[in-house]
Image (spheres, grey):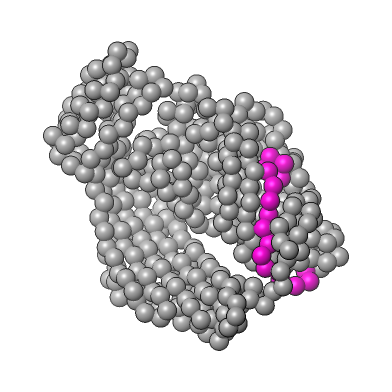
């Protein structure tokens, strides 16, 4: 994608006015998407994103300039603009490049760019038809297919010169069930760092459609959830969104480095129940949030954030590492070349425990079983959150009684971590898009089933 001699020339220009570090990030990405709405193919899109950015550090100050002109002159212009904003720094000497291709433990069998659109449409139609077969109460189904192939090159003054290819494929379905006077929705959104072979091994389009429709129909006939403080069992998979939002963001250098996190300065301290171990990693082959190297050219890692309740690590990018005087953890991520990277999550989950899932519910008394979580809001500085429960069930005397709708979970991340008293054995992960300072990036959330001794449940 870029000649090494040109890369050296651009980096030398970038630090010519005193910068002590410079980096080039170049990207060429092809996206495909198909949207079916109400039984009709509404859009079939193909797009290409191409560009590069030059970033310069001077101590803990950073300047980032980007362009879609990746010619030598376009990159040199970026370097000159970035350098002009950096004056009087200590400068740096360019380390000779140690060129390498990022290791790729997984094999992409069917590159999406080689698959005809008609085959992709077949998967969309299958999910749509399966959702509609669930019930005559399903009045609307939307199915979205997407894939992308992203080639990146990262070079910096520390000798990094690395190329990487990221391939992801995803199928999403949402369904609306109606009684004529009231509507309820359901959804399912599986994906992976795989090519079109995802449909041979990991994603069944019919199951995706059915899952979305069953959730919508179940909630349509559910009474409103009662409000109060009660034990809550949160199921595996997307239940991990609570840890991601209420705790994960508070463990990123983006907030920790400035003392804006409730977990700042707490390494080595007990921050969760002893049954809780939490991981952020980018190394598992084919997972949605996995990378071979991060967007700063640092190899990704398997990072234990919390072990047996004790805070062990933060997620750190290069600039955050300078501010914290700590090494990067392969957590620097960005949406595209138009964004400077910052510390972000990858595949973030609570690790499997040893508790029996049936026992969790049988011994909880009266409470709420949150089978499928939805979106919410969180304040990273305090950890206070409010999340919707998309599919919930009331538990009476240790037995699941009936579904309830309109439930929400309200609390504070650090307090909830301390109140977890059961962690199940069946870890499942689910796919999402996480937004932050450096744009929207694909991340996995996950956990086994967990039980929280008591939480505030919003309802009626």
Question: Residue 158's quadrant in the figure?
Answer: top left
How many marks do you count on the picture? 0
Residue 114 placement, left or right of 331: left
**Residue 438, magenta (yes or no):** no
| Residue 45 appears in the picture as rendered | yes
Residue 354 placement, left or right of 158: right
User: Residue 52 location, x and y as percent?
Assistant: 25, 40
* Nearest to the observer: residue 330 or residue 379: 379
User: Residue 410 location, x and y as percent?
Assistant: 68, 51
| Residue 235 appears in the picture as rendered | no
Query: What residue is shown at x 24% (from left), y 23% (from top)?
Result: 84
Q: Name the quadrant of the C terminus.
A: bottom right
* Nearest to the observer: residue 233 or residue 108: 233
**Residue 413, magenta (yes or no):** yes
Query: What residue is shown at x 29% (from left), y 13% (from top)?
Result: 88
User: Residue 108 location, x and y as percent?
Assistant: 36, 58
Q: Name the quadrant of the N terminus.
A: top left
Residue 275 placement, left or right of 9: right
Question: Residue 232's quadrant in the figure?
Answer: bottom right
* Nearest to the observer: residue 288 or residue 249: 249
User: Residue 48 location, x and y as percent?
Assistant: 25, 55
Find the magenta span and give its range: 400-417
Question: Residue 379's quadrant in the figure?
Answer: top right
């Amino acid at each position: 994608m870029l000649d090494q001699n040109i890369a050296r020339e651009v980096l030398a220009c970038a630090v010519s006015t005193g910068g002590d570090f410079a980096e080039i990030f170049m990207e060429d990405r092809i996206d495909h998407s198909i949207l079916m709405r109400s039984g009709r193919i509404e859009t079939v899109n193909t797009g290409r994103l191409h560009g590069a950015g030059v970033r310069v550090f001077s101590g803990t100050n950073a300047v980032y300039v980007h362009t879609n002109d990746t010619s030598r002159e376009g990159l040199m212009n970026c370097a000159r603009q970035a350098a002009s904003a950096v004056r009087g720094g200590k400068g740096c000497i360019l380390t000779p490049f140690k060129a390498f291709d990022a290791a790729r433990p997984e094999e992409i069998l069917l590159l999406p760019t080689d698959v005809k659109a008609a085959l992709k449409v077949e998967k969309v139609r299958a999910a749509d038809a399966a959702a509609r077969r669930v019930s005559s109460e399903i009045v609307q189904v939307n199915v979205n297919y997407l894939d992308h192939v992203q080639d990146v090159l990262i070079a910096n003054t520390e000798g990094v010169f690395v190329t990487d290819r990221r391939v992801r494929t995803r199928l999403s379905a949402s369904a609306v069930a109606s009684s004529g006077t009231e509507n309820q929705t359901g959804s399912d959104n599986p994906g992976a760092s795989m090519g079109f072979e995802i449909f041979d091994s990991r994603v069944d389009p019919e199951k995706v459609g059915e899952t979305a429709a069953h959730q919508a129909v179940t909630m349509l006939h559910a009474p409103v959830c009662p409000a109060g403080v009660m034990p809550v069992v949160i199921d595996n998979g997307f239940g991990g969104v609570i840890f991601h939002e209420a705790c994960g963001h508070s463990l990123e250098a983006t907030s920790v480095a400035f003392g804006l996190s409730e977990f700042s300065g707490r390494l080595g301290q007990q921050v969760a129940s002893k049954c809780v171990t939490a991981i952020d990693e980018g190394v598992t082959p084919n997972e949605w949030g996995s990378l071979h190297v991060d967007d700063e050219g640092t190899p990704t890692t398997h990072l234990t954030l919390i072990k047996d309740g004790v805070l062990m690590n933060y997620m750190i990018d290069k600039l955050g590492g300078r501010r914290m005087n700590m090494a990067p953890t392969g957590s620097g991520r960005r949406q595209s070349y138009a964004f400077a990277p910052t510390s972000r999550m990858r595949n973030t989950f609570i690790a499997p425990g040893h508790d029996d899932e049936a026992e969790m519910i049988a011994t909880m008394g009266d409470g709420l079983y949150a089978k499928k979580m939805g979106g919410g809001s969180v304040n990273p500085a305090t950890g206070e959150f409010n999340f919707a429960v998309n599919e919930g069930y009331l538990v009476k005397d240790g037995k699941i009684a009936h579904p309830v709708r309109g439930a929400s979970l309200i609390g504070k991340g650090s307090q909830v971590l301390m109140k977890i008293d059961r962690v199940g054995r069946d870890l499942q992960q689910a796919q999402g898009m996480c937004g932050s300072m450096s744009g929207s990036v694909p991340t996995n959330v996950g956990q086994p089933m967990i039980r929280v001794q008591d939480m505030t449940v919003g309802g009626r």
